Image (tube, helix red, strand yellow):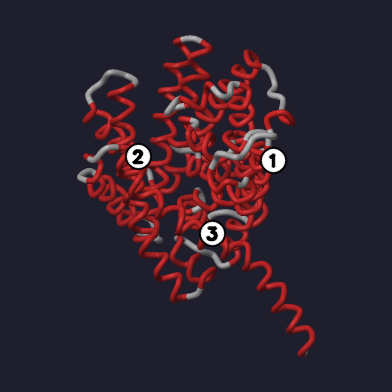
Amino acid sequence: MNCLKGDFWLLAKISTAYIGAVIGAGFASGQEIMQFFILHDGKGLTGAVLATLLFSYLGGLVMFLSITIKTANYKEFLNFLLGPRIGKLMDGLSLFMLLGGLSVMMAGSAAVFGEQFGLPVKAGVWVVAILTSLVILGGLEGVMTANVFLVPLKLLAVFLISLAALGIGGLPDVLQSSTGPARGVAGNWIAAGFLYVSYNMVVPVAVLSSLGRSVSLKLGIAGGALGGFLIGLAVFLVTLAGLAHMPEAASYQIPLFYLTGLLGPFFSWGLGILIWLAILTTAIADAHGFASRLAPGGGSLYRFWGTGACLLALPLSGFSFSGLVRVLYPLFGCAGLVLLVGLLVLPLTIYFRKIKKSFTS
């Protein structure tokens, strides 16, 4: 019984670490889902299914590779996946992106504090910086435990808001809504599905690859696959809810605010908390990825670099949230595409090497 309880706890830690790294402020606001899925009308639901399959497969694959080669940070993972030359380039880019992403989360917290809660903007920056530092001071176990408690809250909130909005608007007529021209990202639901997943894989790779020496192969693969499935389920539900309230929802900068507005002021306040929780868990993931890269052995050096990342990110967090997103997020997309190609090609490469070896032996 204790063994089963321990396995369940570890499975929850792995899956919530993955979810926490993906579901950030853009997801919780509904804007990411609007651009990548809802604006593709009914076909956006098919795109959401594609994203679910990719998130689940890639989560399991990243854990399989990390545990097989026993990685402690993403540098070792990238070198194996992309080779030393491209791996070194991606390593430096990822380190910069994790720090930049942490700055974006701090700026996002400032925006939520000021615009949603009517609190001092600077307080939003410092609360995220302090809480993230406290979690990092707890080491890897502290990061995993924080995710187990925080991530289910935001995931549950996404599910409840989506289902409640569907209860008001009813199920959309998917076939009828598929007839119009696609207005979403890439102009094609297949490309949008792939782009969304690639855009969101940089931070999860940094987080999951740090667990390669900490978990068993079976639990690692199961945790990665489960986390990916739950991410995809959240994407699907938000897409479905958004389609049920089109075209009104598309006119909002934060589409989920429109949906929660239909449910009453309590839900609107709850969405503000949801967005902030998404910001906090992503900030923790960024700081952890940064620290585990520079201090793969953990210990005091890990804590030094993790809290140091929060301090280094403070100056950049003074810029506007939207401005930082506009400048930094295209880098996430480019790096994510390289990672996605590598992850999809590697199994084929290994397979053909085995075939070649069988013929030459």
Q: Which image quadrant for residue 70?
A: bottom right
Q: Nearer the viewer, residue 234 or 63?
A: 234
Residue under numbered circle 3 = 212
Relative image position of residue 327 (x, y in whole percent): 33, 49
Residue under numbered circle 2 = 105
Query: Label 3 vs label 2: CA separation?
Result: 26 Å
- How many neighbours does mark 2 have within 10 angstroms: few (below 14), some (14-19), or many (20 or more)? many
Query: Label 3 vs label 1: CA separation?
Result: 33 Å
Residue visible at 48% across and 66% down?
78
Residue visible at 40% across and 55% down?
331
Residue under numbered circle 1 = 46
For badge 2, the amino acid type reads Met
Quick check: 273 left or right of 199? left
Quick check: 119 left or right of 330? left
Quadrant position of the C terminus in the picture: bottom right
If you read the primary sequence from the N terminus, does the residue marked by circle 3 or circle 2 appear first? Answer: 2
If you read the primary sequence from the N terminus, does the residue marked by circle 2 or circle 1 appear first? Answer: 1
> Helix, strand, or loop for circle 3?
loop
For badge 3, the amino acid type reads Gly
Residue visible at 66% across and 73% down?
349
Q: Nearer the viewer, residue 349 or 289?
A: 349
> Helix, strand, or loop for circle 2?
helix
